[in-house]
Image (spheres, rainbow, N blue to C red):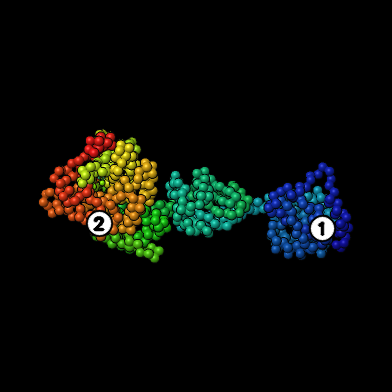
Amino acid sequence: MSNNDKPEAAAGDLLQFAEDTAGEQKPQPAAAFASDAPPWRILIVDDDKDVHKATEYTLQGVAILDRPLQFLHAYSSAEAIGLLMRETNIAVILLDVVMESENAGLAAVDVIRGELGLTNPRIVLRTGQPGYAPEIETIRRYDINDYKTKNELTRVKLYTTLTAAIRSYDQLCRLEAGRRGLEHIIAASNQFISETGVREFSSGVIRQIAAFIGVEPEGLVCAQSEEGDKPEDCVVIAATGQFSLFNGKKLLEIGDRRIMDTLLQCFSKKKNLIEEKDIALFFPGRNAHNFAAFINSRQPPRDVDQRLLEVFCANVSICGDNVNLVEQLRQLAYYDILLKLPNRSYFVEAVDQRMASMKNRAHLTVALLDVDQFSEISDVFGHRYGDQLLFAIARRLESHFSEKCLLARISNDTFGIFGESSLVSPEAFAPFFNASYEIEDVERPITMTAGLVKVDWNDDSNGSTLLKDAFIAVKHAKENGQGQYAWYSPEIATATRERTRLLQDLRFAFTQDRLYVVYQPLIDLATGKAVAVEALMRWRAVDGRLISPENFIPIAEHSGLIIMLGAWILRMALNALRRLHEAGHRDFRMAVNVSTNQFRQAGFLSMIDKALEEYAIPPQLLELEITESIAAMGFNYVEETLSALRQRSISVAIDDFGTGYSSLSYLNRLPANRLKIDRSFITAISDGSSESSIPEMIVQLGHQLNMKVIAEGVETEQQRALLQGMGCDEIQGFLYARPMPLEDLLAWLKLNS
Ligand code: C2E
Ligand code: MG
Ligand code: MG
């Protein structure tokens, strides 16, 4: 029987495959195509080995629709069925009709389509003789793609038959993917509708997208809480796989430019982006609460129908609205994820609501607690450390206040507390003014400053004005040092406003060159000759008023502007000293005031080195005046910097001596060259008060510690005589000269030396 089927199945006949008929479409060589395209899998089923060989030989190196061919072999219908149960993605089955039985091929088709449910593979029946052709009815019933007698299968015919079959297989696959996609969308919608939480919803989105486009579910979803939110401010509302860590963080914190850029484009173009390895999908939300998903696909996504993907995204967006995404985003907008506390917006609204619902506000207080030196701590120990510290403080505050008061994170290192005045008070905060927290197994002392405002002082007040007032109180408290508190009052508000205005004016004056320097001589009491000058800053306002350094220097110090001003006056002073040298005053010293802020600046020493070099001034002619308040920085640091100055032969004077810390043990260890007795003691020198003896004590103390002593603010001849009698070394004061511009000083020196 099967032999009857075989007369033309001889290798000789099949070799005709190689003979092409002129004019027919020529097979393409595979080499011309991308080698990584997956092959079309062709299953040859025939009980004649030669047919297998000849078919494969004939199609050797041929590509169809840009993809190479791969052959699988079965020698009976049973073997073919077994193989089809194991293998996937078989595009075409070249199936012999007569094998183990006369209808073995047709029976196999029945199993393939029916039992195995394989509807996509195309089947090309081959028989040896036309007489064995199945009836039309059979072809229809079994969904057979083509029917050929074996001698019809020349190389070119085989190629065109396969091309047609493969094309229709490919279309069937695409249709199926589309259908699966639609089914997926419907299934996803069902899942999303039952999700209530925004996080479950969003991680569902990642999983569904990944399944939809056939990649790993690695990615994140982030949301804009408001229109125009910068993408880096977007919050990651769900993250899976390697991104899990970023759940709840701001996009910026991920620190991955690629992800940020992709999402940025996605948000700004409001459309999906499908790159080779990154996929970002855009989901328009209600009320501009748009969100986007980033999928780290690692491999190019499966060929996805763009339109289907859009349908998918639109559907997800609708589901997003259904799960109250907007509501939840609002929640996120009210919550500080890092510290797990309500945020400023929540605080303000809660205060407003509480105030609206209460007739008597007299017993309510809004307070702010601000961590002192927080940015310095973060700079030194790192941001992670800073976060841990804030977290520890938040937990402790929570255990003290959250039960009966509202506790929130208002800004970076500032907490807001709102509640009954009996609970929100300086007394209640006392444990926080000076406390210690264990971070990374080390106890760290932390001070906090509080600003408080009574809710009843002004009926127009609301949550945000109260916060503003509390901030003013904090600022005011900080002016007096750390770990303290202040109550808000309209007076301190006025003072703060004035200071703010003054600071703005000062900045402007500096940029407009309205600041200048005057010089006041210091006289050696032994010779009566000027030996040094002190550089003092002056500011003439636009209206011509002279603003006292006593008023603007503290503001410059507080704002940090003093760093710039200090560097500027040093260069001005050294430049003046150069001029003095050129005028013949070769051994003149130049004294320059240095504030604590400048002193602690990292680049302080190098700034001085550079200036000395630029003006070619010998370091021993520069004297820096520091005040005792420098002690607050801690002895070790100060000693180190002072030693570094000493090494350079720069001299140091302790200014306003007697008014500050005046810890004798401290003074003993400070490597300074001179002490400047504060003017207030000089004023009191001859009034017989208990203070009148202080200058003499300071002179003796200074000499014992090997320091020279200078008296400042000497206005009368009597004061001069007394100081000389005490053995004071130098004096400075109106008695000799007022501070004056360089040109006047040069003229003065001509007359007085
Ligand atoms: P200071 O460093 O103790 O400067 C001495 C102050 O006493 C100067 O006030 C000077 O004009 C004043 N003075 C000198 N002799 C007499 C006198 O006989 N009678 C009276 N009544 N006053 C006299 P000025 O220039 O107003 O400066 C005040 C303070 O401002 C300075 O005190 C200093 O602490 C600060 N300051 C001035 N310029 C600078 C600067 O460039 N940098 C820094 N950090 N502080 C500066
Ligand atoms: Mg001074
Ligand atoms: Mg002074």
Q: Amino acid at mark 2?
A: Leu
- Could you say which quadrant of the image residue 752 lies in? top left
Residue 628: percent from the left, percent from the top?
A: 26, 53
Q: Is residue 87 visible?
A: yes
At 43% across and 52% down in the image, what residue appears? 329
Label 2 packing within 10 angstroms: few (<14), some (14-19), many (20+): some
Q: Amino acid at mark 1?
A: Lys
Image x and y of residue 589, in percent: 29, 44
Q: Which of the 4 image quadrants contains residue 588? A: top left
Q: Quadrant of the C terminus?
A: top left
Residue assigned mark 1: 53
Rendering coords of residue 731 (x, y %): 21, 46
Task: Kindly identify the residue that appears in the image at 28 percent across and 37 percent down.
Answer: 742
Q: Residue at x 86, y 59 (%)?
A: 5
On-image quarter of the N terminus: bottom right
Residue 507 appears in view: no
Q: Nearer the viewer, residue 683 or 527?
A: 527
Where is mark 2, residue-wise?
705
